[in-house]
Amino acid sequence: MHRNPTALHVLPSYMKRKVAAGDHSKVKRPKSVKTWDRDVLCLPMSRKNGPSGSSIKYPRGKYCSWLATSGLLGKLHFTTEMSELNVMNEIRSIFNGPMGGNPDFRFLYLQPTGGGARSLTIPFLSSSFKWVPQQVAKLAGQTGVIYILAQDELTLSDIVSDVSVVYLFIHVYSYIIVS
């Protein structure tokens, strides 16, 4: 048997290794999924006192307690795998009761105005802007709370009317004692 000195014998396994090692475009890397758990506070439309860009004061004190008692404070769990619509539907499911069972109620995201001002604003958005999960998570900022503004009327439950009566009673009672 005569061998050709110029012929190169290549093992089949060498070719497979070379192609697999050199072709990185087909290698799929696992995506890391980021998860957030944030408080969400839904403000009634009556808090809006102007067009987009106008400021809305942060809810504080008794008003914040009233919002929580009214079912307008909830917990939101979302991930980077969710779409804009999925995140919005999660928020809608939290506030389904106060929104009168309307699964499609409309709301606007509010963003902190920044610069130490204790207010929120309705941001101006380009027509192509999408509220992807990463953008929604950024809204929580340092407070850890995502604020939304309902664009539909709230349906207040019996609990809220009881709480309102208690607040009214306390206010009237304290007025009588002070006077």
Image: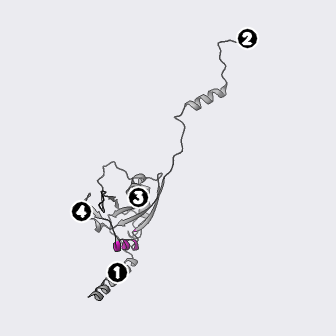
The residue type indicated by label 1 comes to Tyr
Q: Left or right of 91: which side holds 45?
A: left
Going from N to C along the chain, the mark reached first, 1 or 4, is: 4
In the rendered structure, are the residues bearing label 3 and label 4 in contact, judged by CB atoms less than 8 Å apart?
no
In the rendered structure, are the residues bearing label 3 and label 1 in contact, judged by CB atoms less than 8 Å apart?
no
In the rendered structure, are the residues bearing label 3 and label 2 in contact, judged by CB atoms less than 8 Å apart?
no
Q: Residue at x 36, y 62 (%)?
A: 147
Q: Give SS at disc 4.
A: loop
- Residue 12 x/y as whole percent: 66, 26
Going from N to C along the chain, the mark reached first, 3 or 1, is: 3
Q: Quick check: is 62 in the magenta stretch?
A: yes
The magenta stretch is: 61-72
In the rendered structure, are the residues bearing label 4 and label 2 in contact, judged by CB atoms less than 8 Å apart?
no
- Residue 59 x/y as whole percent: 33, 68
- In whole angstroms, how far apart are the C-alphas of marks 3 and 4? 24 Å
Q: Quick check: is 133 in the magenta stretch?
A: no
Closer to the camera: disc 3 or disc 1?
1
Q: Which residue is mark 2?
A: 2
